Amino acid sequence: MTDFYDDLETRSSDQREATLFAALPAHLAHAKAAAPHFTRILAEVDPAAIRDRATLATLPVTRKADLIALQQAALPFGGLAAVEIGRLARVFASPGPIHDPEPHGKDPWRSARALFASGFRAGDLAHNCFAYHLTPAGSMFETGAHAIGCAVIPAGTGNTETQAQVIAHLKPRGYIGTPDFLKIILEKADALGLDGSSIRIGNVSGGPYLPDARAFYEARGVDVYQSYGTADLGIVAYETPARAGLVVDEGAIIEIVRPGTGDPVAEGEVGEVVVTIFNPAYPLIRFATGDLSAVLPGTSPCGRTNMRLKGWMGRADQTTKVKGMFVHPSQIADVLRRHPQVGKARLVVGRQDASDTMTLRCEAAESGEALAAAIRDSLTAITKLKGVVEFVAPGGLPNDGKVIDDARG
């Protein structure tokens, strides 16, 4: 069996960047012309000028956190879709509610590559335990399995005893679903005296793949790998047999930005995952997922050459309420823009004498009372709240993506 889904996975980084960014201007022009949301936010943008990461970073982000409001204001898709609803293959309603469109075509959610890396091959039978009703995960992975050439049992969620019986009777080779549900099914099979040993591989998503679940599957000789994606984007990155981070999908451009901004961070620094995909029906441009991650250095030992993410590292939306007022990561970014002497900063929210406190800890090579006073004034002007400024040496703040640390317990 070949180790790679196609030759795209092993091309040079230069080739990949050149190909993606050669295709980007036309994609931006299409989004700008056909999707009202992008018509508005890209009104002053010349798509032909966006040809590398530096110019891409000048475009506005669209935040997943804003989708509910955008869609309520302009049903059904908030102006982000570029085709009429009747031209789609499926339309989903995820919790929120958020409406997710699925276009026609082979592997529209780009899950085949992730499933292939997990060991799925043409002729396999896959037991798909993602939901098939209203939410897209069931279809997201089924279409990828079909693209590989697998048959699929549309098992869905729940009904653990029935799931165990189906596996015992039909003997699927692979499992697709949440990280913990296969464990529940196999334990039920054991309790009922049913044979669940046909499951040898798995691809899991939709929740953290914790060490105890990994250990359980390893003990049973089941190779289970994780994928990272969203109901809006499809698959963004996936684990490979190297088990060394998550390799980014070939159909996506990934940026890691400082939370609350669209500004890319240095390689290795934790920030928010921002994704651009080439889906002509739903052309999400600089879509800010709200998830934190970081880029790992180098390439995967498995031979795939694309960028790798460290994995899910928390949520980027750290908005908190101080003295009855919301403070947002974007406001801290605004403070830093006024003071380029500061590399990065973290607002620590505490509690003293029954009152909320704010301390802005700033990385700076040089400090002093004059700079501290200026930063305090900016903090007050932007947040309408008073705080203390402390300086630390460059690199003195933890690399965990936190811009606001609520330490009130």
Image (cartoon, rainbow, N blue to C red):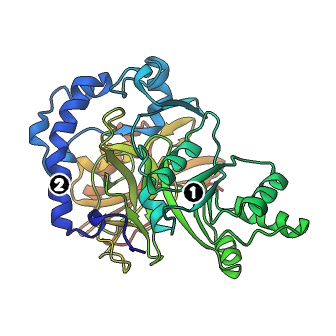
Residue 401 shows up from this direction: no
Describe the element under mark 1 as helix, strand or loop.
loop
Instruction: Say which quarter of the image contains residue 294.
Output: bottom left
Label 1: which residue?
Answer: 205
Question: Image point 85% across, 70% down: which residue?
Answer: 190
Residue furthest toward the front?
Answer: 123
Q: Amino acid at mark 2?
A: Thr
Residue furthest toward the left?
Answer: 49
Residue 329: % across, % down: 42, 46
Task: Indicate left or right for 365 with 112 as reference.
Answer: left
Question: For this rendering, which residue is in front, 101 or 290?
Answer: 101
Task: Indicate left or right for 17 with 229 as reference.
Answer: left
- Among the two numbered marks 1 and 2 on one chain, the one whose residue lies closer to the N terminus: 2
Crowding at mark 1 (Cα within 10 Å: few <14, some 14-19, many 20+): many
Residue 378 shows up from this direction: yes
Residue 55, numbered circle? none
Label 2: which residue?
Answer: 19
Task: Indicate left or right for 155 with 62 as reference.
Answer: right
